[in-house]
Amino acid sequence: MGRALRADAERSVRVILEAAERVLAADPGATLEQIAEAAGVARTTVHRRFANRQALLEALTESAERQLAEAIEEARPDTAPPLVALHRVTANVLRVKGAWSFALGHPAAQACTTGTVWAGVNARCLELFGRAQREGLFHPDADLEWTRQVYYALIGEALHDARGRDPESLAALVADTLLHGVGQRPGAV
Amino acid sequence: MGRALRADAERSVRVILEAAERVLAADPGATLEQIAEAAGVARTTVHRRFANRQALLEALTESAERQLAEAIEEARPDTAPPLVALHRVTANVLRVKGAWSFALGHPAAQACTTGTVWAGVNARCLELFGRAQREGLFHPDADLEWTRQVYYALIGEALHDARGRDPESLAALVADTLLHGVGQRPGAV
DNA sequence: ACTATCTGCATCATCGATGTTGCAGTTAAT
DNA sequence: ATTAACTGCAACATCGATGATGCAGATAGT
C-alpha cells in the first residue's frame, strides 16, 4: 500500500465518492467527466485518486457498505426486543440507503470485496429474524429467506416514495407491512 | 412508415428482440455485437432492422409491454372476484415478467412511449385494488399507492427466487404475503 | 521557510462501440 | 421465373470515454 494521503487528497477522495453516488444514481452510465464536474474537480484528479472506473466503483461500494454495516450495528439488533430492533434497524438502514442508493442498490458491486460485508449484513438480518420467529413475532411457518427478500424489497420501495417523510414513519410503515400485509385483519370489526 | 416487412425480416426482428432480452438481462451495458451474436445474426442486420441502440431498446420495451398488458387482460381482473383476480393476474404477470425481466424492469424504458402502457397497467392494478378494498379483502385504511408499490416489489422478488417453482405457487406466495405479511396471526393458537 | 504532495490545465494516444456503405449471394413473394 | 427484398461479410469513418504525461502554481506538513 501507498503512504498516507495528504489532507486535501483525502478530501478529494471524499467529494469524488459523494459526487459519484449522486451522478451515478441519476445515470448509471455517467461519465467520469460528469462525476468530476459534480465533484468540483478536474477529471485528471479522479484518475489520480482512482486507477480506473472499476476501482472508483469498488471504493464507492466499500465505503457505502461500511456505513451500512455500522448503521446496523448501531441499532443493537441482537440485544433489543425483536420488534424494537426491527424498527430501529429499518430506520437506520433507510437513512444510509437513502444517501447511498446507487452504491448499495447495485448487485454488480457485491463482487468487489467478494461480498464479505453483504454476507455479514444478511447474517445479522437472518439472526434477528430467527429470534423474531422464536419469540412469536413472525409466523412459525414463515420462510426466513423469503422474508429477508421481502424486507429488503420493502425498504427499497419505502425509499422510492420517501417524499419528505421521515425515516421513523417510513420504518414503521415497512415493519407494519412486513408483519401484517395490507389485508383486512381477522380481529377487525 | 415503411412498407410491410418480408417474412424473413420479421423473423429477424423477433430473434433479435429475444436475444436482446437475454443478453441485456445478463449485462445491461452489453454490445450490439453481443446481441447480434446471441441472435445468430450479423451485426449489420441489427442496424438494418433498428436505426440505433435507442430504437432497439424502445422496440424491445414496447413488445414486452404489449405482452404484459395482454397477460393482464387475459386474467379478467375486472370481472373475477378480487381474490381470484389477484391470483390470476399475479400468475400471468409472473410468466411475462420472467421472460422479459430486462425490458420490463428498466425504468428508462418507460420514457419511450411516454409510458402509455404503464399508465394503463397501473390503472388496472389500482382499479382491482380499489375493488378489493371495497369488498373487504384489503384493510380499509390501506394506502393503495403504497400497496401497489409493495405488490410490484413482491412480484420482482418472487421472480428473483423463482428457482424452479411454478408461477401458480409463486403467485400464491405473493398474494399471501401481500395480504397477511409474515407476522404471527392474531387468530393462531 | 522548506519540501513533498496535490491540483488544474492542456495535450496526446488508444480503444471499443456505433453506424455506414457496397457487393455478392440467398430467399420470399407475385 | 422474375424481381425486389433480405442477409452476411468486409471495409471504413466517427465519436466519446478512458487513461497517460508534463508542467506550473497552490497547499499541507514539518
Image (cartoon, coloured by chain):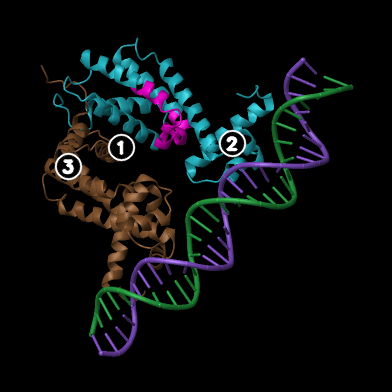
Chain colours: A cyan, B brown, C green, D purple
Residue for point 35% across, 18% down: A124
Q: Which of the image's four quarters has the C terminus of chain B? A: top left
Circles 1 and 3, Cβ within 8 Å, touching? The answer is no
Side (left or right) of A149 relative to A139: right
Q: Which residues fall within the magenta stretch?
A: A97-122
Give the main secondary structure of the magenta stretch: helix
Q: What is the secondary structure assignment of the residue under circle 1?
A: helix
Q: What is the secondary structure assignment of the residue under circle 2?
A: loop
Same chain shared by disc 1 and disc 3: yes
Q: Dot 3, crowdedness within 10 Å: few (<14), some or many (≥20)?
A: many
Looking at the rendered structure, the kind of residue marked 2 is Ala
Q: Position of residue B178 (x, y in %)?
A: 22, 34
Q: Chain of mark 2?
A: A
Looking at the rendered structure, the kind of residue marked 1 is Trp
Q: Which mark is residue B167?
A: 3
Q: Position of residue A123 (x, y in %)?
A: 33, 20
For residue A93, which quarter of the picture? top left
CA separation, marks 2 and 1? 43 Å
Examine the structure image and report whether residue B75 is included in the region drawn in magenta: no
Q: Dot 2, crowdedness within 10 Å: few (<14), some or many (≥20)?
A: few
Q: Which residue is mark 1?
A: B146
Q: Position of residue A26 (x, y in %)?
A: 48, 43
Q: Which of the image's four quarters has the N terminus of chain B? A: bottom left
For residue B59, which quarter of the picture? bottom left
Depth check: give the residue in front, A113 or B127.
Answer: A113
Examine the structure image and report whether residue A120 is included in the region drawn in magenta: yes
Depth check: give the residue in front, D4 or C7.
Answer: D4
Same chain shared by disc 2 and disc 1: no
Side (left or right) of C29 relative to A34: left
Q: Which mark is residue A51?
A: 2
Residue B96 visible: yes
